[in-house]
Image (cartoon, rainbow, N blue to C red):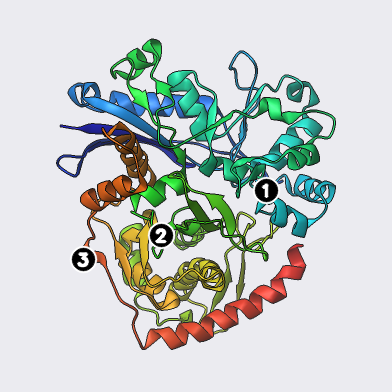
Amino acid sequence: MSVFLGIDVGTQSVRALCFDVESKSVVAQASSPLEMISRDDGTREQHAQWWISGLRSCMESIDKDIRQSIKAIGVSGQQHGFVPLAADGSVLAPVKLWCDTATSVQCDQITQSFGGLEKCIAETGNAVLPGYTSPKILWLKQNHPELYQQLDTVLLPHDYINFYLTGERVMECGDASGTGLLDVRNRNWHSAMLAAVDSDRDLSGCLPQLVSPESFIGSVRDKTASELGIPAGTPLSCGGGDNMMSAIGTGNIIPGRLTVSLGTSGTMFAYSDQPVIDQQGSLAAFCDSTGGWLPLLCTMNCTVTTELTRNVLGVSLPELDDRINRVPPGSAGVVTMPFFQGERTPNLPKGQGCIFGLNQTNYTADNLLRSAMESAIFGLRSGLDAFRAQGCEITSARLTGGGANSAAWRQIVADIFDVPVSVQINDEGAALGAALQAAWVHEQGPLTKASLQSLVDQVLETDLSRSCDPNPQHVPIYAECYERYQTHLGAVMALYQ
């Protein structure tokens, strides 16, 4: 076997996946659930130690012989989380996560200090949005100045796992794009943005070295290897944010491919060989983790909307698709605004869930369920429009994430986007992408994008039984429904500014 370990630190769980490149198969995998600290002010936090405990639990459940055969490791992690390290490597505070919206005030302060929204996008490529890392740094300064004074290194969640494994404090440009501190065109830290976060302190000393994706960053320390039951000295690739690793794990490393991730959040991205800067701010201008760029749209409410609705109505997951299919497209006029966690796109950190269009005939459980599911895709549809406005030709979509397991949801995506939809046989997303990145770096010979493309094309196969085309009768219906959704969204915007 030629086994590579992919680790993914998500919001809901830590996953470990062992992928055998020779057999093109997952030979072992495990997951460990994570809790979240939530407060009414929008706080969403986790303790970094929970991730380490989860990783240890995962590795303990994988066969010892498989663990000992691991050749290299790649790590994926939820983007934007702020892991503040002291000089001795201890974590100073709970980790504020990507879905934390308690920092909207700090976003406004940084944007104003820098010179306004247009200047932020013009110079760095991105707006300063709730969820990004930079406002979390300012939040720590303002709310816990005694901890801020001890801040030695700013890391992201996947960087912290890299640090635990190797002792190295580094970052790569894909995940670094989501800090709001990177000049994505030139792939370096933006000094004026750092000054906008803190004009009294040079934060550049707290930012780790940016590393290239084509080489290993270090090897697993003896003590850590013993804890996890893997060979000491196992090399580690740079890894990346979960979206960047999902791009590799879905073969989205050349132009023309669109990946749509239906998880707690909804995400869509496409590869570009040059920066894609959206002056409207709908698309995040991120780098990818292969040397290119990954324009991306993220909504904070996707499967969470359906899960909340399903739980309130007492509908089990196995019966969900059958209940959805009882209702025609458009949910008989019921329209959901799915902003249960606030929202990033559109920028409504104080947003709340709303339901419109109810009357005495359409107020049914099944209409509410289908509307919740449709609303998540309407939220992503604006991203498809933004991609096309930037000249990105999108002709198909590959789904990943938990929502991709639903046949009803796959068809809804195809109908609302009006493009064919596919799902992979190895639909393991970010964890698989991390393993493949490690395998790529481990390959002998020159490392090129062509060699990575060759690798993913060899091991990734489409599951034809779960692919679907747009229903020509549903497409025009959903075009009207999307316009109705946009009308309701315009009415809601003023309520939550």
Instruction: Identify the amino acid type marked 1.
Output: Thr
Q: Regarding mark 1 in the picture, which secondary structure is present there?
A: loop
Q: Identify the amino acid type marked 3.
A: Leu
Q: Dot 1: within a 10 Å radius of its alpha carbon, few (fewer than 14), some, or many (20 or more) residues? A: many
Q: Position of residue 401 (x, y in %)?
A: 38, 54
Q: Which residue is under mark 2? A: 259
Q: On screen, 228 above or below 238? A: above
Tag 2: amino acid: Thr
Left or right of residue 284: residue 412: left
Q: Nearer the viewer, mark 1 or mark 3?
A: 3
The residue positioned 52% from the left and 86% from the top of the image is: 480
Q: Residue at x 64, y 56 (%)?
A: 342
Q: Which mark is residue 464?
A: 3
Say if 155 sits above or below 482 in the image.
above
Residue 357 in view here: no
Residue at 49 percent of width and 73 percent of height? 371
Q: Position of residue 141 (x, y in %)?
A: 78, 31
The image's mark for residue 101 is 1
Could you tell me which secondary element the residue under label 3 belongs to? helix
Decide if residue 477 is on the left or right side of residue 226: right
The 10 Å Cα crowd at callout 3, few under 14, some 14 to 19, many 20 or more, is few
